[in-house]
Amino acid sequence: MLANCPELGTLAKHVRTLAHMVTDLHGDPLPEWIESARTATDLPRLSRFAQHIERDLDAVDAGLTLPWNSGVVEGHVNRSKMLKRQMFGRAGLELLRKRVLLA
């Protein structure tokens, strides 16, 4: 399949490299990856994706290099939204407050 479609091989290489950076939190090769992806003229969507990453490069680099994350906070926000959806139309703010505090 890769022999019939060289673009697929190029795309697979870029995706594997990015996946390695994301899973192992290695942000150092990110600028080289972006440049390589932007110059892939046969893959315009990959090039646009790299441009979008470049727009927010500081945040992406921080996410790939710093050990902190907002997973715990996102979990609490998700739980609060779930409680709010469950109670929609049933009670007021006071009951929602009690459920959030007691959950």
Image: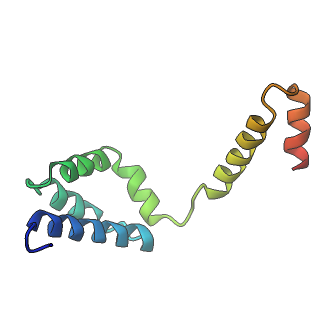
Q: Is residue 102 left or right of residue 71?
A: right
Q: Is residue 91 above or below residue 34?
A: above
Q: Nearer the viewer, residue 88 or 33?
A: 88
Q: Residue at the location (68% across, 53% down)?
A: 75
Position in image of residue 74 (x %, y %): 64, 50
Quarter of the image where one finds residue 65:
bottom left
Q: Is residue 26 above or below residue 56?
A: below
Q: Is residue 29 visible?
A: no
Q: Is residue 38 left or right of residue 72?
A: left
Position in image of residue 15 (x %, y %): 28, 66
Q: Nearer the viewer, residue 95 or 2?
A: 2
> Which image quarter holds the N terminus?
bottom left
Q: Is residue 56 visible?
A: yes
Position in image of residue 48 (x %, y %): 22, 46
Q: Residue at the location (91% across, 33% down)?
A: 95
Q: Is residue 91 left or right of residue 36?
A: right
Quarter of the image where one finds residue 22:
bottom left
Q: Nearer the viewer, residue 24 or 9?
A: 9
